Image (tube, rainbow, N blue to C red):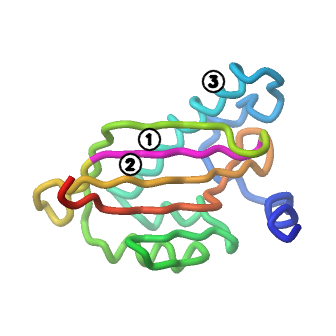
Amino acid sequence: GDLDNRIAKPLNQTLLDSSLDNNPLCKQTTNTSTIMAAEEVAKAFVAHFYQCFDSDPNQLANLFTGESMMTFEGQQFQGPQAIVDKLKGVGKVSHQIKSTDVQPSSNASAILIFVTGGISIDGGNPLHYCEMFQLVSTGPGAYYVHNCIFRLNYGL
């Protein structure tokens, strides 16, 4: 359907750093090796995403496309500019990652990532959060964030 066409549409940009260029995710045939490749991609992505978010959110723009969607505390944003503007509007942040769970998605070119941790906003006390990403490959080692959902966890 329409979603398949959007995912399959080629992109002319590398969306993660070159250290992922030789990642074999799309070439794996066994479940175990696909999971391992997904975990390698996720580990690199999570480190890169939160380092950029904490230091200069403008650097995150190249991880999103016009088709990317983020839901932040129930509000939806689409496209790199709207997403980055929202993230910058949060304030100066510092993330402390507690856990990262990874699964290959419905096809070999997509990965689901679920992150929990603490976020300090403008130097305040850390708040618990969870965030989900779906990365979609545009070629070997190149991924973009197709979906992102962020929630603070209150009173848990």
Query: Is 23 rendered above or below residue 149?
Result: above
Q: Could you tell me which residue is drawn at 43 percent across and 54 percent down?
A: 131
Identify the amino acid type marked 2: Gln
Number of residues whose C-alpha sits closer than 10 Å to that of mark 1, classed few (under 14), some (14–19) or many (20 or more): few
Mark 3 / mark 1, whichever is N-terminal: 3
Q: Could you tell me which residue is drawn at 59 percent across and 77 percent down?
A: 78
Q: Give the range drawn in magenta.
A: 109-117
Give how far across and how far down residue 17 sits, in percent: 60, 44
Q: Do the residues labelled 2 and 1 touch (CB within 8 Å)?
A: yes
**Is residue 89 rendered to the left or right of residue 30?**
left
Which residue is the site of mark 3? 36
Give how far across and how far down residue 117 sits, in percent: 30, 46
Cα separation, mark 2 vs mark 1, equals: 6 Å
Mark 3 / mark 2, whichever is N-terminal: 3
**Is residue 151 rendered to the left or right of residue 103?**
left
Q: Could you tell me which residue is drawn at 79 percent across and 43 percent down?
A: 107
Identify the amino acid type marked 3: Met
Q: Does the magenta segment cover residue 61? A: no
Q: Residue 47 carries which label?
A: 1
Q: Nearer the viewer, residue 85 or 133?
A: 133
Give how far across and how far down residue 145 sits, in percent: 61, 57
Q: Residue 51 carries which label?
A: 2
Number of residues whose C-alpha sits closer than 10 Å to that of mark 2, classed few (under 14), some (14–19) or many (20 or more): some
